[in-house]
Every structure is written in structure tokens, then in C-alpha cells.
Amino acid sequence: MSDPLDLSSSSSFLPSVRHAALALLRERDPSTKARATQLFYDRMLAMDMTLDVTARITDPLDLPGRPDAPELVAPSSLKRRSMQSDAGRAVLLHALAHIEFNAINLALDAVWRFPSMPEAFYIDWFKVAAEEARHFSLLSARLAEFGHAYGDFPAHDGLWEMAERTRGDVLARMALVPRTLEARGLDAAPPIRRRLAQAGDHASAAILDIILHDEIGHVLIGNHWFRHLCDKANADPHVAYEELAERYHAPKLRGPFNFEARRDAGFDEAELRALAGLDATGSSR
């Protein structure tokens, strides 16, 4: 599939936002997906748009669109390498680029898949997709400076596997992707950034600063819509989260946690106290 949306012309026509998200999700070329996602979001903000919030869109069989490489393997088969070498930092940058590529897909999937949400839901998740696309582009450009490209190293598919599990449940998707899997990035980013800086790789460390800043906003969006859906269902968000995490086999929560970033991202004090208990005991839920 080539460029999924012809945005190069000056035409004022824009397809339905949700149909556009699906077209972008199906795009297999990472650079095209990233570029077109950012461009569509910019155009979407600049002109009238059709959201089609109630449309029931047929689920295609070719999701997500992704290239033949990287090879997807079990997480246990991925070896950690020292960040003191260029080779080790290239592997790290590739792993981060893979996370961001998956994050583009996850945000686009939320836009097209779940009908009958408030209009702000679709705008929020398209914004997330555009920012994840920017992260992917920054990491890809930095990876190129090490003589590598996305696809050069193996990766795992844990993020998209959770998307598959929660494909029929928007509450579970909000609970277990942004505020569970992506929230883990809030915890992981500062120590990775410190190690990069210690290795003298300040250019890569600066990209981590951008990503952490934006990811706080993304998790905040997830928290907002999770609580919106809980309120609509008259459900206690703490109880609902525990039930969903068990039902959908979410990863166990393990510290250390970035409490400041998690607070900024909308986790409440009860949730932070529970995480502090895990951090102190080293145990999981």
C-alpha cells in the first residue's frame, strides 16, 4: 500500500476521520505511516472534518499494517546490550522506535475501532497518533546516524497483542493500553535517559525528554477516557481496573515507579499509594 491518503494536493476534501485512521493503520511502510498521520492531523485541525462517530466499520484482516521487518520474537529472546557502545545504543534506539511505531498503530486503532464515543475521544487519539509518529520519526533519524534503519533488529509484539485482546472492549483498551502498558514508559524513560547521558549520547537523551513529556499527556488522555467510561457505567475505577487487568492478563506492575510523572498523567493518590506498596515490597498485584 502506498500513501494511504493523498494529502499532497490543495483540495479541501478530507475523508471521515475514523475511515482515515483505518487507512493509516493499514499502511505498511513506517515512514509513510508516520508522515501521513502527522499531515492528516494538521489538516484535520485546520478545516471542517467529518467524524462519523456512529459508523460501524468492518474490521479488515490485515491489521496492523507493518513491514516484513523487524522479525517479531519472544521478549525473552531479546538480549540487552551496553549503552556504552554505538552498537548497544543502536539496538536501544531500534527498540524505542518499535515501541513508538506500535504506539502509532494503537492510537489509530482506538480512533476507528470504537464507535459512539464523544467527538473529543477521536480528536484526542488522533493527536496521540500524530505525536507518536513524531517520536518514531525522531528515533528513526537518530538510528540512521548510527548506520541502521527500523527493521534491522528483532523486536517483540507485546503492545499489539494487548490491542488484539481488547479489540471488543473500549473500557479494557483504555485501562490496559495507555494506563498500563504505556504508563510503564513513564517509569522506564528516566533511567534510560540517564544511561544515555552518562554514555555521552546527549542527542538521544534529548529525544527521550521529548517522548517523556508527550507520553505524560498520552497517559493522561487514557486516564480521562477510562474514568469517563467508568462514570458512564457507574463503576468504581479502582475495582474496574483490577477486574480488567485480571480478565485480560495484563502484565504485573513492578517498580521502580515514576510517581511524579504518573501523578501528572492523572493517576490518583489511592493508585499511587498502591504502587508505593508494590515498590516497597517488590511484589506485584
Image (cartoon, helix red, strand yellow):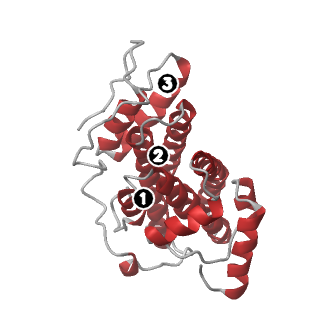
Residue at 64% x, 67% y: name it.
Answer: 187
Q: Is residue 65 above or below residue 281?
A: above
Place of residue 78 in the rendered image (x, y in percent of width and height, measured from the top left):
39, 77
Q: Is residue 6 above or below residue 57?
A: above
Name the foreground residue: 225 vs 45.
225
Name the foreground residue: 223 vs 240.
240
Residue at 46% x, 59% y: name it.
Answer: 99
Place of residue 23 in the rendered image (x, y in percent of width and height, measured from the top left):
32, 35
Q: Give the residue at mark 3.
A: 44
Image-based side of 104 in relation to 72, left or right: right
Image-based side of 156 in relation to 272, left or right: left
Q: What numbered label is drawn on residue 29?
A: none
Name the foreground residue: 232 vs 261.
232
Image-based side of 148 in relation to 197, left or right: left
First-in-chain label (3 vs 2): 3
Task: State the SS at label 1.
Answer: helix
Place of residue 216 in the rendered image (x, y in percent of width and height, measured from the top left):
66, 52
Residue at 36% x, 80% y: name it.
Answer: 77
The answer to whether one can see residue 11 in this image is: yes
Task: State the SS at label 2.
Answer: helix
Q: Is residue 80 above or below residue 172?
A: below
Q: Amino acid at mark 2?
A: Ala
Q: Amino acid at mark 1?
A: His
Q: What numbered label is drawn on residue 98?
A: 1
Q: What numbered label is drawn on residue 107?
A: 2
